[in-house]
Structure formats: structure tokens, C-alpha cells
Amino acid sequence: MSTRAAVDPNTAGDHGCDCPVEVIQERGQRQVFCGLTSIVWLHRKMQDAFFLVVGSRTCAHLLQAAAGVMIFAEPRFATAVLGERDLAGLADCNDELDRVVNELLARRPEIKTLFLVGSCPSEVIKLDLDNAAERLTREHAGRVQVMHYSGSGLETAFTQGEDKCLASITEQMPQAEENEAPSLLVLGTLADVVEDQFRRIFDQLGIGPVHFLPPRSCEQLPAVGPQTRVIMAQPFVGEATRALLSRGAQYVNAPYPVGIEGTRGWLYAAAHSFGVAEQRVDEVVAAPVERARAALARQREVLAGKSITFLPDSQLELPLARFLANECGMRPLEVATPYLDRQLHGQEAVQLGDGVRLIEGQDLERQLDRLRDDRPDLTVCGLGLANPLEAEGLRTKWSIELVFSPIQGFDQAADLAELFARPLVRHESLRV
Amino acid sequence: MHLALWTYEGPPHVGAMRVAASMEGVHYVLHAPQGDSYADLLFTMIERRASRPPVTYTTFHGRHLGADTAELVRQTVRDAYERHQPQALMVGDSCTAELLQDQPGTLAAGMDLPVPVIALESAAYSRKENFGASEAFYQLVRGTLVANQDGALGHAAPAADSDRSAACDRPTANLLGPTSLGFRCRDDVKEIKALLERLGIGVNVVAPLGATPADLSRIPAADFNVCLYPEIARTTCEWLQRQYRQPMVTTVPLGLGATRDFIREIGDVSGVDASAVLEQCTARMSWYSRSVDSNYLTGKRVFIFADATHAIAAARIAREELGFSVVGLGTYSREHAREVRQVAKDLGLEPLITDDYLEVEKSVAEAAPELVLGTQMERHIAKRLGLPCAVISAPAHVQDFPASYAPNMGFEGANVIFDTWVHPLMMGLEEHLLGMFREDFEFSTDTPSHMASSGAGQERAAEQEQAVAEASVAEADSPGAQIRWTPEAESELRKIPFFVRGKARRNTEHFAAERGIATITVETIYDAKAHFSR
């Protein structure tokens, strides 16, 4: 490896005390979406919710470009675009916001929940959306619940927007009594099909009631209390998790349900918290595990021995790299994540073993230098970089697809592997 | 504050990025938080560009705000200059950075870099993308020419206009305005260069697309400027006219008539005899349009909404070259609205000057056209309303950056426009056959003919589904919500080809509502038909 590929010691350092492996911190230019982008899947998940970004023309343009394929004839998100007049005085700004919200609700009377989403500019001018949400909730009492969170790129990267959104929802959840029956709360957006699969397994295990957050409808939020067991289905919901723990809920320590092993470990942990034996889990999941193994074996033939680098994007990088290394035989070279929660991601990092460069943050040009030296068989990166890297002869996988696609659970394990195999298979088959 | 679902233009710094990304040897340092780097994907995904746009972001975070973002700017400028070694550096800020008032352009200008530093004011809260592009191009040209006079680029000072072409045996022109993410710019430039070649006119500089800062310094050497995309180039062309007495050709060669006018104007400005090239005009479009099959296009009602240049051109092509009837005309380019107003007035229309997508949607629905010519946003609108649509202007989708050679300007451009506009419609003979066979049990209006296999096939299928889904919504909004259709009338309505059925339904309901008719019978349909066909 050449010297320029080495990580700059000046920007390296600070190995978090909770993380048992070495993590290199990089700071510099980033190529990561901001938290606003998570609206693109959150609005699909919560069908009665609308997301109103209070921000600039840039925010509106970002959402349009990131939903970019621009396929939705009428999305359930929009932007209240700040103009020069709004920057002049804040009182005026609140009136303007009320007017825009009224206009929006007149157009979409079916909306039950409205999220006011803070952005970089609204944060810099210190627009108080918390107050605005309270005021608007009072004004539209009985019809619309107005909530607020920040998806600002000053504080959040990509999937962290969902974390902020879920944390704001937890504030609205009723308090459960001490003596209520135990319940399971699964945290982090899952595709409906995955939710249904997990629900069937939990039913067979006799675990219930099970609630998913975000819910498909915001109208009836589950209660949370000391009998609530919280399990994370996505690695990027740390703040929402801590918010629930502060309400007395119990944390279920589990791997993320990616791949056969991750899913099994995740189910063991959930089962354990309800006093269900591992052996019972094995009985219930025997058939789907067998199916998944057979399907995964085909993809493993393509992936085994191939090297892979993750550029920072969704915080899914660690569990995905663990799955690809342990279950598909790939060799992760560099795994970068925009933010590494040392408490919540530590075990996933350990499973990657030695010899993998773990990076938190990004210094884009340096990372691209290392990538060009490594020349991995596959690079997972954001949309802005994929085509330029392909033009340099590198095979790429759009990271955003990993957030939108159903990838968790047994029956999706092979589909997930196929997402990585496809660019390689395609490269082999093309004669252009 | 205004409500935006879709926007026609991005912020001004995205316009500046388009100029930087169009050129070689230019680098743009953008003071912006991490999320703003999304703009890269406009180029690499929508335009399928093979390299990253030449932009470095400062990527400031919340934790920087209490500290020194100005030092972050200086550091980023230093690093970007050292790594990319550009011939000219553009420096500006995005909307959030503008609020911090770091004035990155001034900071960078004070760093004594050995290349011209172009400081851009973004005005993100009052201006938009095309203004940003126009301003960036103007500042870049002006900055480069001033630096050039100072000898910074190592070229001689520009020639006085008496020296122009003195050494050449033929007149030369600059083609100004084509940019990255513009509509068909790459192919338009190729087509217009070839046209100028046939006229015996040399092309001095094409900018910003493909130009270097050194190329910009050669702009004054040409005899005249062709203002190919006024949204981007007019400010620059007007400045060059004042500063270097360079005449400007203002006709935009979109469509047959405009291309002929363009050739004539070039002849006038350059003194070249253009008559031979004018006579040689053999665009297939003029014959296709006169052919019998095109008779069905007569009076087809079209709604046009685009940037000013393409909207104006489309109105002329629609009326004069395809025999359409223009029922709506508008633009989101407020800076160039005056010309659109004039054209609308000539057509007897109220122009729609807005960047509010919702307002455009409302106007299209009211006009009930048979074809929508617009941007990617009008494609959404048309989809929602179940109308055929062709995209004629930016903002566009990845499918509007075709792999094939598909200019819109010049004679070949006219051919491309004929195809693009006519394909979403039923062809003439087909429309007749559809009428003849609609009673046949083997014929299903659910799978209408060739349209499912056209380029936009899948989209068409989705559109129809959408149209069905939307129908109930549309009906609830329509004045006919209280009006009942007799089964006989419903069945008669179904005999009308599906692509005009929605309009027939709306017209009939309007007709009934105006006359207080509560139940629509077969008679009502024909009364309404007679009424509207006046």
C-alpha cells in the first residue's frame, strides 16, 4: 500500500472506549445525504403522515433529486421554502408557516399526522419548530397531530433523520403501567413484508404483543413502560432507543437482523427477553433457515473471495460487512460509516475480525485515494459517486438501495446477497 | 415562505455548479453543510456523467458553528487548489452558509492564489438556478478577461475589434450558453457547429460546455456571439456587446422556421451569403408534417410550460409547423417572462408565469389539453391527469438524456422534435382504425395499440392505472359531482376513444352543470358535443 493510502495520523485517533476494536476517525469533505432524505422512505411507511420540511430551495431540490428518480406523482412530503422576507423577522416566519400548513391541509384533508422537519437554514436562524408544532396541534386539535424533529445536515447524516423522527414519535407514546403484560417494540423501519414475516415468527414463539416503530399509521401509538422490551431492527436508531429506555423500557441487546446468523441472533435475543428457549426458536425457524441457506449458497458462489469496500452512508455498513464476510465469504477491506455508536455497533465491529480498516466519518478525497489503491471487486457508495467510480473501472453498488429494499430476515438473506452479486454478474456478462 | 412539492429550478449555487461542471480546468469550492453534496448526483445520475463535478464542499457541521467556519473555508480552498490545480477557482456558498456571512469569495480572494478567483454571491433566498448559472458564467467570463488583461493566464490582450478575423479568411462566432444539465445541449452544439460550417463560419469558442478558462480569454477574438441559451448566456452576451462591440445573434434555432430565421440573422450579422444554405434545407420534418397521416394533428390542443426559450420556440413550432392549437403557454423563467408574455398575447392567451407547480397543475387541468409539452414536472402533472406528454425543456429526467444523437436545434432538431411530440399521441390512421374497431369484441380499449410498446411504454401503463385511480378523485372535484349519468349515457361515453373520453366527460358535466341538468342522457352528450364543437 502506498503512503498516500495510509490514513493521516493527524486526523486519526480517538478510539472510543466502548468499542473493542480500533476505529479511525476521519474529518473532511463528505459525500453523504443529510437526514432529510430519510423522509423518502418514512412517508411510504407511515401512510397517513405528511412531512413538511421547513427549509430552503436547496432542501426542496434535494428531496426531488434524492427521490430522484422522481417517480411519485404526488409525494407525501413538501418543503415550506424560506424566502428573503422570512429571514427578516421571526414573528412573520411563524405566521407564514401557519399559512403554508393550512394550505397543505386543505389540499390533503386525509393527513392525520404532520411532521415539521427542521433543516440546516431553519436551525441556523433558530426557527422554533417545537413551539410551532405545539401551536399547530392546538389549532388543528382533533384533526391533525403535528410533530417536529430535525433532519438538518448540520447534525444528521441520511438515516439519522429517521432516528430523530422516531425519537419525536416516542415523546407522543402513552406511558404504560408497571404491571402491564410484557410487550416487544421493534425499532426502525422495515418493509411491510419483513414486518409480517417477523410477526408470524413471534406469534409462533408466543411472543406478544409486538409493536413496530415507525407504525404504518400514527393514529394509535403503543404505550411504553417498564414492561416494554425494545429491540433495534436498524442500526441507526440509537437516539430513539435511548429515549425509550429513559421511559423505563428494557433494552434487548441483539445483533442486527441481517443475514441468516444476524436474524437468528436477533430472534434469540428477543426470545430470551420473553423467557423463550433458543431451542424453541430453532424449531420455529428451521424451515426458513433451510430455505435461506439453499438460496444463499447460489449467491455465495459469486461473492466468495471477492473484496469489498464500504463508503460511509447509512450506518448499515457494519452489519452488512459482517454478513458478507461471515456468510458470503467476501473480504471487507475498508468499512466506513458516517457515525459509529460505540455502544450499539461494537459487537458488529468485533465480528469483522482484524485486518479491516474501520473508519468513522469521511475525508472524501483521501478515501478515494485509498479506494484506487485497493481496487476492491465491489464498492458500496452513494449515488453521487457510483457512475464516476464505474468509469474508473470499479464495480459499485448503490448504498441507497440497501435502505429501501427488504433485506432483513431469513427469506431476504439471499436477496440481499444478490444485490451485491448483481454488479459482478453483470460485469462478467457484458461485452460492450 | 411558499409551499413546494416539486421545484422547477434548484438554488443558485446549483446553477453555478452547472457552469463549473460544464468546463475544463475550473474548480468550485462551495461553502456548504454535508447534505448539499447531493447535487453531485444530478450530474452523475440524471445526466449519467462519468466523472464527479469539479466541486469541493467545506462540509461544515453543527460543531463548527460555534468555532471558526472561516478557517474551514480557507483550509478547503487551499486543499482544493493544491489537489486539483485549476486554471480558475470559483468560490461561493450555499443557502445555509450564506446565513453565516463568512463571505468565502472574499476570503479566497485574499489568499493570493496564482489563478483567477471568481467570488460568487449566491443570493439563495431570492434567486434560483438559472440566475446562478447566468451570473456564474458572466463572472467567469468577465473575471477571466480581466485577469487576461493583467497577463495572469499568459495570453496576449484581446484583439481590438478591427483586428478580428483580419488574419482569418472567414468570419468566426462564439456559441454561448450550452451547459451541463441543460436540455440536449451536447447535441445542439454539434448540430449548430455543423450548420455554421456549411455557412462558412468558423466557431471560435463554445462556452461554458467544454471550454477552459483559457478558451474564455479568446472570446473577444470572434466576430459575433450566438446567444444559444438566453437563460444562461444573455447577460454575458450583452456585456460582450457593450465591452467589445461584439454583435449578438438572438434567434434561437429551435424548429424549422426559427432555424431559417437564425440562418438569415447570421447572414446579416456576418455578411455571409446564406441563401444557398437556406435553399438546401431538407429537413424531413416539413414533409412529415404535410403528409396525409399528419392530418389528425390539426388543431390538437396543446399546453406548453417550460423555460422561456423552449416555451417560446414550442409555441411557434406547435402552431406553424405541426398545426396544433396552443391552449396554454407559460414559463418558470421569470427573468425572461417578457418575451413569453408577448408570444402569449399574439396567441390570444393569458400567459402563465410562475414557478408554482400546483398552479401549473391547476391550469393544465382547466385547459384539458390533448397533449402537454413541458418539463419533468409536467410529466407528473400529465400522469396525474391521464394526458399524453412530451418533455421539451429542463428540468429533465435521465431518460431525456438519450444515448442516441438527438439535438433539438437546427434541421435535424426539427426532425427530432416531430418524433418526440407526435409519439405520445395516437397516429392518424390508427385513430381512424380505433374508431372503426372499437365495437369489435377482440379490441380492448384497455390495451391501446402501439402506445404500450413505445419508449414510454411502462410509464404509459402506469399512467393509465394512475388515471383510473385518480378518476374518482377528479370526479369528486368536478362540477359534475352531483350529476348522475344514465346507464345508456355511460355506455355511449365508453364508445368515445379513451384518450378523449375524460375530456368529453368533463365537458358534458360542465355543460349539464351550467344548465342545471341533473341527469345526463345520451341526448345531453350530443348537445354538449355540439355546444363545444362550435
Image: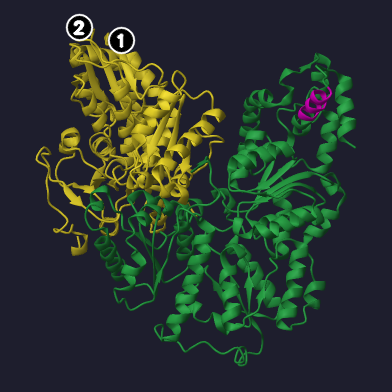
Q: Quadrant of residue A287?
A: top left
Asked which secondary structure carries label 1, the reply is helix
* Position of A405 relative to A177 (above/below): below
Nearest the eye: B8 or A230: B8
Nearest the eye: B369 or B512: B512
Q: Where is residue B72 in the image (x, y as percent from the top left)?
A: 26, 60
Q: In which quarter of the image is residue B188?
A: bottom right
Q: The green chain is which one?
A: B
Mark found first going from the N terminus, 2 or 1: 2
* Position of B380 relative to A140 (above/below): below
Q: Can residue B402 be found in the magenta stretch?
A: no
Report crowding for label 1: few under 14, some 14 to 19, many 20 or more residues within 10 A (C-alpha).
some
Residue bearing the label numbered 2: A179
Chain part drawn in magenta? B505-515
Residue bearing the label numbered 1: A204
- Residue located at (65% from left, 75% from top): B248
Q: In which quarter of the image is residue A145?
A: top left
- Residue located at (49% from left, 74% from top): B141
Residue type marked 1: Gln
Res. B128 in view: yes
In the rendering, what colour is chain A?
A: yellow
Residue type marked 2: Asn
Q: In this view, does B282 lie to the left or right of A157?
A: right
